[in-house]
Amino acid sequence: DVKVTQSSRYLVKRTGEKVFLECVQDMDHENMFWYRQDPGLGLRLIYFSYDVKMKEKGDIPEGYSVSREKKERFSLILESASTNQTSMYLCAGFRSGAPNTEAFFGQGTRLTVV
Amino acid sequence: QKEVEQNSGPLSVPEGAIASLNCTYSDRGSQSFFWYRQYSGKSPELIMFIYSNGDKEDGRFTAQLNKASQYVSLLIRDSQPSDSATYLCAVNQGNTPLVFGKGTRLSVIA
């Protein structure tokens, strides 16, 4: 009954590395989102996509980019990892339309940049 | 700036009691309202959604929505220690990204 899958639960990367976080959904949802979650700051939107090859910046896109070549896959890219990007990263898939009644998260990737 | 406000807690209730979690939102155009439960170190898990004024019940959980007051709540009846978690309220308009509150930490005392 898996709906949204993130490729890694835990990652440790070095400062300056290019990091790829992968997310796949099997719900045939158009809308996919990347959030990061930090203590005291809650969930903050990084990027989102409403369709293949389409992307929109969220509230905190600096230092990140995304790729959506196929409907089911939405990748978050850290161009040059920095220690302030150490965080829990959460991918979500949402069904289109209003009212929206399906909005599911993957299991999360805890990224540590050293 | 669209905002969703929740009391951070912790909210402590004894086992078997009713836990009441509250959320207010600023955007009157919000159409869908979600409650997520998040255990420490885990990702948010969808508990309920609601989009019509009134109450929606699912087992021990009841979501209540009052659009005029821009207020949504979650009641947990017969609270169990396993309900101890952080509860996140989220809202959106149709396809727009979910806007989350920072969550309320619930502790159910056995």
Image (tube, grey):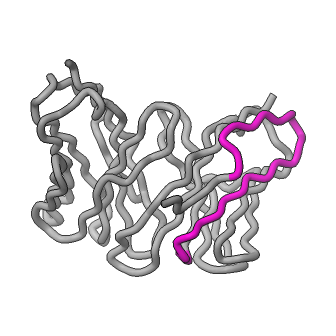
Q: Please tell me which residue is depicted at 42% across the width and 57% down the height of the picture.
A: B99
B68 to the left or right of A32: left
In the displayed structure image, the side of residue B75 where residue A80 appears, left or right: right
Q: Residue furthest top?
A: B110
Query: Is B18 located above or below residue A32 in the figure?
Result: above
Look at 84% across and 52% down and name the residue there: A79
Front-lying residue, A47 or B105? B105
Q: Quadrant of the N terminus of chain B?
A: bottom left
Q: Is residue A37 left or right of residue B11?
A: right
Examine the structure image and report whether residue A24 is included in the region drawn in magenta.
yes
Name the residue at 65% across, 38% down.
A110
The reply, left or right, for residue A107 in relation to residue B91 is right
Q: Position of residue B92 (x, y in %)?
A: 38, 66
Residue B46: x percent and y percent? 37, 54
Residue that appears at 65% across and 63% down: A24
Query: At which x and y percent is residue B22?
Result: 21, 44
- Of residue B95 and residue B82, the one placed in the foreground of this image is B82
Residue B84 vs B93, above or below: the answer is: above
Q: Is residue B73 above or below residue B81?
A: below
Report the span colored magenta. A7-30
Q: Nearer the viewer, residue B38 or B3?
A: B38
Q: Quadrant of the C terminus of chain B?
A: top left
